[in-house]
Image (cartoon, grey):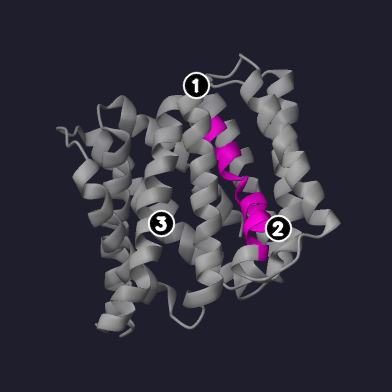
Amino acid sequence: MICAAVLWGLIGPVSRLALQEGLSPLEVAFFRGLFAWALFAAHGALRREIRVRFRDILLFLPFGLVGVSLFYGAYQLAIHFGGAALASILLYTAPVWVVLLAPWALGEPLTPSKGLAVGVALVGVVLVSSAAGLRFHPWGLGFGLLSGFAYALYYLFGKRYLTSYPPAYVFSYALPIGCLGLLPFVEFHPKTLPAWGALGVLAAFSTYGAYSAYLAGLRRLPASQAVLLATLEPGVAVVVAHLWWGETFTLTQGIGALCILAAATLGSVACRKRFASV
């Protein structure tokens, strides 16, 4: 689980390298999904987990469009406009979105502890977005919150529909669907060797490797422990973004970030059964 958190925490800083080399945010999202799909497809083929069924394509269509097209695209745009640190922090509003959507999607009540998580997260978002020390941009805030929302839908959809499928099978469908959803909006550019390297790291380590490590952790740890360890991701992203790109937090924004992570922890504990099934 720690390995998965570290690999996910590299997404923002490594994506900034690709963006600095002239790639567009949606282009980074597209190639991340495309290369990771090749790895999952090879994995599934070697384990004989790949089969083509039309009804599965219809099932995975919304998952690919939301969990890949919307999620990957919004997160890259959040990194582009707001920086790696802010994007990673706002991504972890996802458990709060799960709390808010669960009564409608899964019929689960909004308990006082879940309501507290929502309130703490809102305070954190206000503090992070109101201070001026970080490279703040309103589009960065908007796309960061959208990535958290898409991430929440990812979990809710997984809880309802995907628990009976092997991960390689799921992503062998979802990733190409998601890439096709991104394709009409992608502007392609010539790529330098560092750009190709960044895309390869995002696909091999921060997507294929991270998902594989995360699922291996879930098989060995209680769900609540697994999810709490995964919240190390934004901490890794903030530290790497500071050391590599010089991104910094003001004291006010640091307090806001801690509020969001505290809310994520509360929401994760309250929703641990949902997270365990993805």
Ranked by sequence position, the earlier of labels 3 and 1 is 3
Residue 268 tag number: 2
How far, Cα to Cα, is label 3 from label 1?
24 Å
The reply to whether callout 3 and callout 1 are in contact (CB within 8 Å) is no
Q: Position of residue 60 (x, y in %)?
A: 36, 71
Within 10 angstroms of label 2, few (less than 14), some, or many (20 or more) residues? many
Foreground mark, 3 or 2?
3
Label 1 neighbour load within 10 Å: few <14, some 14-19, many 20+? some
Q: Earlier in the sequence, mark 3 or mark 2?
A: 3
| Magenta-highlighted residues | 85-103
Q: Residue at x 39, y 31 (%)?
A: 16
> Relative to 138, does residue 272 appear above or below in the rendering?
below
Q: Amino acid at mark 2?
A: Ser
Q: CA distance from mark 3 to mark 2?
A: 21 Å
Q: Which mark is residue 66?
A: 3
Q: Which residue is mark 1?
A: 137
Q: Is residue 227 visible?
A: yes
Q: Position of residue 97 (x, y in %)?
A: 62, 51
Residue 123 - label: none
